[in-house]
Image (tube, rainbow, N blue to C red):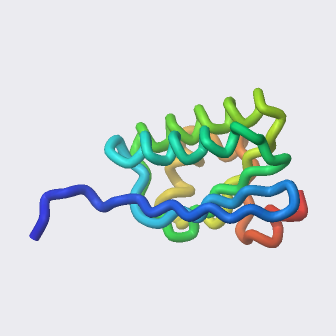
């Protein structure tokens, strides 16, 4: 058994003015920098909308939440809209406790996010 943290897998998909980051795993102190790097590379040519697909994210800690808040601010400065999709109950509760569900646009499905 390994003591290594569960890694975060990120796949990027682009479609007409939208970039979708499909995330799988855990967003924590160890994986947040990699997520930030992928996100910042998107802002080199900012899309109109950036969707973070969190349907496969099982866990997020405070550093992960902080990173996503930072990404939203950077997206706004680049005139991109950040949308979070498919938060599992455990992950969504973190956003609700911190009242960040009012700060972010959150949808249940990718189709809903694409329409915003």
Task: Decide if residue 58 is in sight here.
Answer: no
Q: Residue at x 80, y 40 (%)?
A: 80
Horizontal relation, residue 28 to residue 71: left or right: left
In the rendered picture of this protein, how many numbered marks are placed on residues? 0
Location of residue 22 (image quadrant):
bottom right
Q: Quadrant of the N terminus?
A: bottom left
Q: Residue at x 56, y 64 (%)?
A: 11
Horizontal relation, residue 51 to residue 91: left or right: right
Viewer-side residue, 39 vs 86 = 39
Of all residues shown, which one is farthest toward the left?
A: 1
Q: Quadrant of the C terminus?
A: bottom right
Q: Residue at x 67, y 45 (%)?
A: 42
Viewer-side residue, 82 vs 20 = 20
Horizontal relation, residue 15 to residue 99: left or right: right
Task: Decide if residue 89 is in sight here.
Answer: yes
Q: Residue at x 85, y 47 (%)?
A: 48
Counting from the top left corner in percent of width and height, residue 34 is at 44, 46
């Amino acid at each position: 058994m390994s003591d290594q943290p569960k890694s975060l897998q990120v796949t990027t998909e682009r479609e007409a003015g939208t970039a979708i980051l499909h995330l799988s795993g855990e967003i924590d102190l160890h994986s947040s920098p990699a997520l930030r790097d992928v996100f910042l590379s998107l802002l080199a040519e900012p899309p109109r909308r950036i969707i973070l697909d969190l349907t496969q994210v099982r866990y997020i800690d405070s550093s992960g939440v902080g990173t996503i808040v930072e990404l939203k601010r950077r997206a706004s400065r680049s005139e991109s809209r950040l949308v979070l999709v498919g938060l599992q109950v455990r992950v969504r509760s973190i956003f609700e406790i911190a009242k960040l569900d009012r700060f972010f646009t959150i949808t249940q499905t990718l189709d809903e996010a694409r329409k915003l």
